[in-house]
Structures are given as structure tokens and as C-alpha cells.
Amino acid sequence: MNALTLTHEVLVGLMFLISVFFLLGGFPVAFTLGGTALIFAFLAYFLGIFDLSILTAFPQRMFTVMTNEVLVAVPLFVFMGVALERSGISEVLLESMGRLFGTMRGGLGYSVFLVGALLAASTGIVGATVVTMGLLSLPTMLRWGYNKELATGIIASSGTLGQIIPPSIVLVLLGDQLAVAFSEAQYKMGNFAPDTISVNDLFAGSLFPGLMLVGLYMVYLFVVTLVKPKWAPSAPADESVGERDWEFWKRLLNALLAPLLLIVAVLGSILGGLASPTEAAAVGAVGAVMLAGYRLNEERGGPILHGGMAVIAVLILTAFVDLRMQRNVISGGEWISILVALVLSFLIMRGLLVAVYRVYSHRSSKGIRILSEVMRSTTEISSMVFVILVGAGMFSLTFRGLGGDVLIEEFLKGLPGGTVQAMLVVMGVMFLLGFFLDYLEIIFIVVPIVAPILLQMEVAPGVPMDPIWLGVVMGVNLQTSFLTPPFGFALFYLRGVAPESVTTGHIYRGIIPFVSLQVFGLVLLWFLPGLTTWLPHLLYPR
């Protein structure tokens, strides 16, 4: 090894370690990544081992980001999630599910799992879900006599389902990065016309694994109720869940119908090929505003209900009829369908205007207009995502300019265990980084570096690694990392809202069984990749 190669390795290692050091010190992520990259670029230039012309590609990268239609889905999904969070949907769902399962041992735990899955499929914001579930359900679970470890484990694990159950912001960003990585890997392998993968593929691939994790959680809770029934009792006598009469079922249907319709409209339109993730996210944002407006005044919710039903009707109509008017030949039946679509569009517009007015005029407990809160939160979260993407772009350019990608490729391909060993090393590094870094930094820094290398490897002779499987495994791995003591982010979120009677030790001990279930789920995905690939290959055959 010559001195020049050694200098490259030292600079690459120092750049990565110093970036992590500053991130742990609380410095802004985007400025840390971009600033560290610039410092090392100029340092390497003065040492004569870096060409500054490499940085001229940075503006083009940012222009590509700005014109990437897939990334438009990020602020729309964020808006959808924040609007639903502010609309009080969590409280209604928990109350309804609690009454449905309250008479069973562990009933409230089952309710939390199901509500967590519904919120994951409608919001996809992990931190908000953990905090909301902790504030709403943890006091009730403790009052009913639930074991503290079990209660905190249930809430933390269900709150992180938004990482892997689509539509998820994590999956949108991960899918976008994997699409680029897959194309790069194919070019290096000599395939200049590769099949592309999309966020749709990742959504379809992660749906069943996400539901599988929910099933594993519920099976574990069922076993606990059999072995240690006092850990998860049913509702106490003085907190009756009431009779399951017609009024109960009516309230339950009212609580579940709108969120389920929104999930079907968004996720169904993506998986069914009716809409791209960006278009579906726009539908979700409109639906979230309508749902929020309806919740604020259900007695006068007719126009909003009609608008919501019209959205579903338009999506169904689009699946069977070509509604484009810029055509030379349009049949009579198509003209009728177009007129019906125009009427439905009017109903949608009326319902949306009513909902927007209600959300704008209603004030939260803080005295701030709900729509203002939603817009402010959406702007803050979206700005954070894209500013980090800018800093990560500079970091990636400098890293590659120093030959870091070549060093990592030689290291991974030189491991004695081949593809299996390389995957284990990458998953281990991502798992450890998940203790200290948010998913954004990991997706924007680690995935672009390691994914093209892994996607050039073969899981068996003549069988290349599937990018959809790789993306889902990475997503579940990050979710597991966010749950694992002592640094899991979800545990810190829960610690911030838990009552004083619940200690950090309770939270750490309570989450261990669920982390074990996550690891078991990863093992299943490892040995049964068809759990991930069968649905996208069925929906989008190549």
C-alpha cells in the first residue's frame, strides 16, 4: 500500500468520523455534512489528491433533486400526516378500539397495535405516533393494571410501524435512493437499459412484511395473556366499555370508515397503478383536510362526506374509463363518464372548501389556527429533509472524489463470506448508526455508497440481489435500530411523555421482547425473500 492510498483512506475515515462526532454534538445535520465535505475537499486539494472540478457536479445534482417528481410526495405525505395528527383521529380510534377489545385480556394492547398500524398507513410519522400513543394509551393501560414493561413495549413498537408500513416517508426517500443505486449498479455490470425500480415497488414489497410484524406483536401479546394474565388484564369493572349495541357499532364504523377509505384511496391507487406516489400523496393531503374538517363538526359533515365519497368514485372511474378530453375520438359512453367526473369534481371542491374553512377557522388548545399549525409543521419537516439532502449531496461527492466508494467496494467484495458477509456488515453498520443518526442521514449518506455495491453481488450463482428485498430489509433494520436500547429514538420519544412512575428501566426491559420479534422478522425476510418480492412482482410483472 503506497502513501497516496494511505492518505486517501485516512481522509475518508476522518471525514466520516468527524461528521458523526459533530452530529452527536448537536450541530445541524445539513451544515455538518456539507461543511465537513468542503473542508476535506480543500484539504485533499492542497495535498494534491483531490480535483476540485468534481464539485462542479454539485449544482447539477441539486437541479436533479429539484426536478425529481417523486420527492414532491414528501411534503404532501408530511402534510397528510400532520393534518391527521391534529384532527384527533388517534383519540377516536383508540377509544373505539378500546371499547371493541376492552372485555378481552390484553384487549387494550391489541387496540394499540391495530391503531398503530392504521396510523402508520395514514401518517407515516414515527415520532408523532409514539408521542401520541404514549400520551393517550399509556395512562389508561397503567390505570387498568397493565405491567409497565409490557405497556411501554407495546406503545414503542406500535409507534415505529410507520417506518415500514406504506405509505411511509422513509420508504419514499429509500425508494428514490435505491432507484439511483440500482441503475448505477446495472451500468457498472454492462446493462445500459436496465429495468427500473420505483417507490411503488418498495411500497408493495413492504406491505406484507409490515403486516407480518403486527401479527408477530399480537401473537406475542396473546402468549403473554396466557402465561401471565395479570400483566394484561381486561377492562376493570369501574371502567365499563359499555354494551355493544347499535350505537356502539355505529360509532365504531364512524371512527374507522373515513381513515380506512383514506388508506384505500392512497395506498390502493399506488398499488393498483392508478396513481404515482406523488399523485396519491396529493389525494391523501386532500383527504386528510376533509377528514380533519369532518371531525371538527360531524353534525354538519354532509358536504365533506359527499366530497370524500366523490374522491373514491373518481379513482374507481379512472380505473375503468379514459377521462382525457384531448383526444380525436371520444365515444358516447366516455362523454357520459367525463360529465359524471365533472360532477364528482364539483362535489370534491365543495367538500374541500368547507373542510379548509373549518380547519382554518378552528383554533387548537394553544390558541393557534389548526391549518396554520399544519402548514408550519409541514414546512419545517420538509425543509429539514431537503436541506439535509443538499448537505448529503456535497458529502457524497467529496466521499467519492476521495475514492471512498472504491475503498468500501474493495472491502465488501474482499470479505471471506462473500455476499452474506457483506450484507451482515452493512446491516450491522446501519443498525449501529441508527442509534445515533436519524433515518434521513443514513438514507442519504450510507445507502448511496453501499447499495450500488451490494446490488452488483449475487445471492446465489446467477441470481442477482433483488433491490426491493434489499430496501425492505434495510427499512426493517432501521426500525429495529430505533427500538433497541440504550439509544433507540423511539424510546426517547416515549420517555419524554411517560409519567414519573414509568422509569427508563421499565421502557428498556419492555422493548427487548419486541426487538427480538423484529430480529426474528428480519431472519424470516432473509431466508424467505418471497415474502417481500411476491406482491411487487405480481402487481408489476417484468
Image (tube, rainbow, N blue to C red):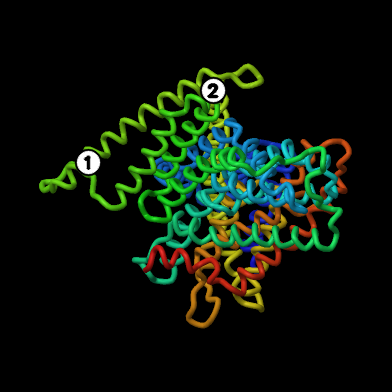
**Visible residue check, residue 411:** no
Badge 1 marks a residue whose secondary structure is helix
Choose between 112 and 398: the one closer to the eye. Answer: 112
Choose between 176 and 376: the one closer to the eye. Answer: 376
Q: Is residue 145 left or right of residue 133?
A: right
- x, y (%) of residue 103? 74, 49
Along the polypeptide, which appears first: circle 1 or circle 2? 1
Residue at 36% of width from left, 38% of height from top?
A: 310
Total numbered badges shown on the rendered structure: 2
- x, y (%) of residue 425? 67, 66
Query: Is residue 468 placed above or below 502 in the rendered structure?
Result: below
Residue assigned mark 2: 372
Q: Quadrant of residue 353?
A: top left
Q: Quadrant where the N terminus lies? A: bottom right
Category of crowding for the residue at label 2, using alpha-carbon neighbours closer than 10 angstroms: few (below 14), some (14–19), many (at least 20): some
As drawn, the residue found furthest toward the left would be 328
Q: In which quarter of the image is residue 476?
A: bottom right
Query: Is residue 131 placed above or below 530 in the rendered structure?
Result: above
Q: Is residue 359 left or right of residue 139?
A: left
Residue 338 tag number: 1
Category of crowding for the residue at label 1, using alpha-carbon neighbours closer than 10 angstroms: few (below 14), some (14–19), many (at least 20): many
- x, y (%) of residue 127? 66, 41
Q: Give the label, 1 or 2, closer to the camera.
A: 1
Q: What residue type is labelled 1?
A: Ile
Residue at 55% of width from left, 48% of height from top?
A: 121
**Visible residue check, residue 227:** yes
Q: What residue type is labelled 2?
A: Ser
The Cα atoms of the two marked residues, 1 and 2, are separated by 36 Å
- x, y (%) of residue 47? 61, 51
